[in-house]
Image (cartoon, grey):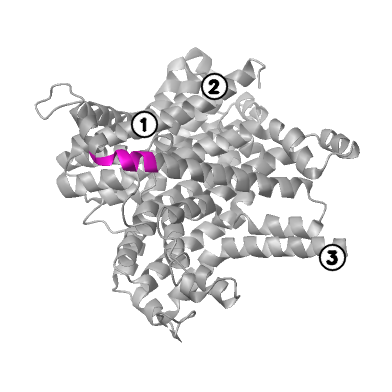
Amino acid sequence: MRRLAGTAAKAAAIALFAFALIGPLANLVLWSVAERWYTPYKLPVTYGTRYWEVVFRPTGDAMSALSTSVAIACLVVVVALAVSVPAGYALARLRLPARTLIMIAFLLPQAFPSIAIYINVARVFYGLGLTGTIAGVVLVHAAHALVYSVWITSAAFAAVDRDFELAARSIGATPWHAFRTVTLPLAAPGIMASAIFVFLESLDEFTGTFFVGVPQVSTLPLLLYNASMGGNYQIASITALILLVPSVLFMLVIERFLRADVLAKVGR
Amino acid sequence: MTSRRFPLSGLLLVAPALAMVAAMFVFPFVLSVVSAFSSPAGAPTLANFAKAFELYSGDIAFTLLIVGLSTVLIALASIAIAGTLTLSETPWLVTALAWLYRWPLFIPFIVAAQCMRTFLAKNGLMNNSFVTLGVLDPDSTQSFLDWRGIVITFAWKQTPFVALLLAGAMASLDRATIEAARNLGASRLRSLIEIVLPQVAPTLLVGLVLSFVTMLSVLSVPLMVAGSQPTMMTVDMAFRINSYSDYPVANALGVISYLFTALAAWVYLRHSLGQERGQP
């Protein structure tokens, strides 16, 4: 009898926990298919996909925000990796003065309250004609994501067995050739993981775009914000769901790219 | 390797990334501090801080309170989750919990804010579910879209992150000490508090400090979940800029938020340095 009561209490606790975790997401899904929903009705009055059609209309704001967001995220990945692969390699393999300080330098943009930084970046960019441009937003996102790209690529290089490189070098490969044909391919899954981190970081970024991108650059998070503040919960919810898809996919595949041996070296 | 002969090559490879941090973080950071301490004529002054305190002292205290309360809730919830995952003797409970708790992990703050904006409303799914179950009276429902909403959103979003770190740290502990405590008759709660937690405290602290700093700089959640006063400093900074182009006061608020971050970093460093010296 006590055992039964214990099981019932555990089941109730996990049900409450599930409600707290999944409830907000369920509410989002409900709003995305609610054509009409007002008080005192507990569930949508009429269901339908009308707003999905609005969002996915090729000429609509949402589609242009989606393509802007994806284009920015891809450019951010290119910029971040272009500076992070050399830096990550150097941090993993070469002797550097003040190595710990250099590692911490990349953490700073994430560790400090970013909003005060963005305000001043926007001010500087205004003088340079970079506010409201894709280039300006890409720079802001890339700097913010550097901690992921540098730390993870560095861990990926550190996890590559040095003996493979030495073997390539001893049979006559130049350092560059050994890097390109041995080290880089072996570190590729880790670099891929850092690229995914950077892509998502850019896709989900709101505050920086809010200050540097407005009014010309509209990304999905800005569209979500404007729709929600304008009371258009359907559009806001559908946009939120679009942003959720890559996040959830990422949660499911991250372990495949970020192997334990790489993960153990992150931040070292 | 070639690098031993050319230590410069390493610096050259790191230079572009460091230049980016310098241009996009260090430079604007210095600008914000200089602007916060400068009068319109450029003379050093504390007037911007005086004005920031005069206008927003309530919001500054409110911000600390919200972020502090959220951090406490995140700590309790993640200890409960990770503790259950590690010590529970009910396999189905562990499986269900392990599957459930990670969901908000990679959800962006702005999406979490939109979820909560509907879920916590007076007629949101939360109240409606409780009314349907008969737990709440339809007339007594209230909206949670105020400071409570911000705290709930922060805890919902950040708990999985800290719980993930903590569960990982607990999983790598030596089970023998826990088994020994259990064999000597300690309850699971007591083993958790007296045996497990002290060993994973550094991991918990890292997770909490990172969450504290992250929550301090979130703009979307206070904007979308709680529209009215009092609100968080991030909203005030955005307002000073967008409505008045008042950079000095916004930057003064920014410097205050740096100080909060420094406080969190100090707590962390003091603890981790103490550990290195062999003190708890």
Residue B119 position in % (x across, y down): 48, 66
Residue A137 position in % (x across, y down): 30, 47
Residue B37 position in % (x across, y down): 21, 26
Instruction: Confirm whether circles 2 and 1 share one chain.
Output: yes
Q: Which mark is residue B258?
A: 1
Quarter of the rendering containing residue A78: top left
Query: Badge 1: how crowded within 10 Å, few (<14), some, or many (20+)?
Result: many
For image coordinates 50% across by 56% down, the residue present is: B107
Residue type at mark 3? Answer: Leu
Taking the image as shown, residue B274 lies to the left or right of residue A37, namely right
Give the Cα separation between the discs numbered 2 and 1.
18 Å
Residue type at mark 1? Answer: Tyr
Q: Quadrant of the C terminus of chain B?
A: top right
Near-viewer residue (B175 or B156): B156
Q: Residue furthest right?
A: B183
Using the image, name the chain to which the residue with label 2 belongs.
B
Q: Which mark is residue B270?
A: 2
Give the Cα separation between the discs numbered 3 and 2.
47 Å
Quarter of the rendering containing residue B240: top left
Local secondary structure at mark 1: helix
Taking the image as shown, residue A229 lies to the left or right of residue A180, namely left
What residue is shown with label 3? A4
Using the image, name the chain to which the residue with label 1 belongs.
B
Which numbered disc, 2 or 1, marks the residue that appears first in the sequence? 1
Residue type at mark 2? Answer: Arg
Q: Residue furthest left?
A: B41
Query: Badge 3: how crowded within 10 Å, few (<14), some, or many (20+)?
Result: few
Residue bounds of the magenta highlight:
B55-62
Q: Quadrant of the N terminus of chain B?
A: top right
